[in-house]
């Protein structure tokens, strides 16, 4: 090396060049759309559901019988629960329309419950009525804190649900109504997830572009929001009362 040559420079992570390196981009989030069942709340434990419905009919079920009935009813199909193992042909039309019309939702799920003989008069209707009440559901532990943090940050919120009944009374009973700007329910708007139209309707109601909106859910139907231009976060559903990781929404929606 010539006497006048300078030694090569060693670049470090803290050098000016490193500081000037491009950073990963992140879309701003001005609104968050939440699924209802499996994302913000879960139906109550199945045995309790069965026992409460029986009590409404004036019957008392012992634990073992209630557990056995619950297992059979879950296989048959529960509103807010697993899909039925089989839909009887006579219920096929109601089933296909269940999230578009109130009568179809009720008829489909009471019809499925009636395939299980519990020997209790009015039991199928009582099971369905339990789902229509806030007592039949359990909000996830992170639901209220997450919605409150978004409200404080000025992020608009909508609940987007494939459902055949009004869930607004549930939110009122839980003290969460003031934290939700809009409810977009399939039976009211005539569209079901994953149809992009239901997500676009929600964005329109919030006055926010889809490109600035995050959809949060627990199923592939919720991921259909991508076709509407929204970002999507899919979280696995958890049992009632268990943490489902909803706080991850704040990591994506709020400035770091």
Image (cartoon, grey):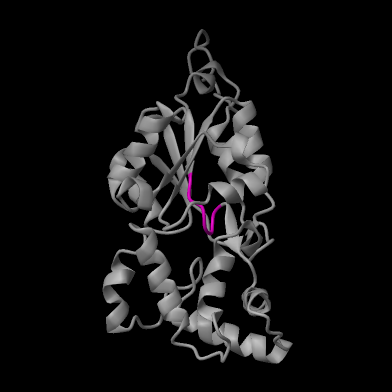
Residue at 40% x, 26% y is 207
Nearest the eye: 53 or 68: 53
Q: Residue at x 36, y 53 (%)?
A: 187
Position of 106 relative to 141 (above/below): below
Task: Give the side of residue 132 with respect to residue 48, left or right.
Answer: left
Point out residue 31 in the picture as x, y percentages from the top left corner: 47, 32
The residue stretch that appears in magenta:
34-39
Q: Is residue 43 magenta?
A: no
Where residue 45 appears, x then y in whole percent? Answer: 65, 72
Which of the pair 244/82 is nearer the observer? 82
Outermost residue, top direction? 4
| Residue 246 in sight from this viewpoint | no
How many numbered marks, from 0 up? Answer: 0
Please tell me whether residue 22 is drawn above or below residue 45 in the rendered image. Answer: above
The main secondary structure of the magenta stretch is loop
Percent position of residue 64, x then y: 70, 91
Does residue 35 show up magenta in the picture?
yes
Is residue 144 among what the camera can see?
A: yes
Dividing the picture into quarters, in which one does residue 176 lie?
top right
Q: Is residue 143 left or right of residue 33?
A: right
* Left or right side of 46 for 190: left
| Residue 141 position (above or below residue 75) | above
Q: Nearer the viewer, residue 185 or 106?
A: 106
| Quarter of the image where the C terminus is located | top right
Query: In which quadrant of the rendered view does residue 39 lie?
Result: bottom right
Q: Whole-percent x and y of residue 192?
A: 33, 53
């Amino acid at each position: 090396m010539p006497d006048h040559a300078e030694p090569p420079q060693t670049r470090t992570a803290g050098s000016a060049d490193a500081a000037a390196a491009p950073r990963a981009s992140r879309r701003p989030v001005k609104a968050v759309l939440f699924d209802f069942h499996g994302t913000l709340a879960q139906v109550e434990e199945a045995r309790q559901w069965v026992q409460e419905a029986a009590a409404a009919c004036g019957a008392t079920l012992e634990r073992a019988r209630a557990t056995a009935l619950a297992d059979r009813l879950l296989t048959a199909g529960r509103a807010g629960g697993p899909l039925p193992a089989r839909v009887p042909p006579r219920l096929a039309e109601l089933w296909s329309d269940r999230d578009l019309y109130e009568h179809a939702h009720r008829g489909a799920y009471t019809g499925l419950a009636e395939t299980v003989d519990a020997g209790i008069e009015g039991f199928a209707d009582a099971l369905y009525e339990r789902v229509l009440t806030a007592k039949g559901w359990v909000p996830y532990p992170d639901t209220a804190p997450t919605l409150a943090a978004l409200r404080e940050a000025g992020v608009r919120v909508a609940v987007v649900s494939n459902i055949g009944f009004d869930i607004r009374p549930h939110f009122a009973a839980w003290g969460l109504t003031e934290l939700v700007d809009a409810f977009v329910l399939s039976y009211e708007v005539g569209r079901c997830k994953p149809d992009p139209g239901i997500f676009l309707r929600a964005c329109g109601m919030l006055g926010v572009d889809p490109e600035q909106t995050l959809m949060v859910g627990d199923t592939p139907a919720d991921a259909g929001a991508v076709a509407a231009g929204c970002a999507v976060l899919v979280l696995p559903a958890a049992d009632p009362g268990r943490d489902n990781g909803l706080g991850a929404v704040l990591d994506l929606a709020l400035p770091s």
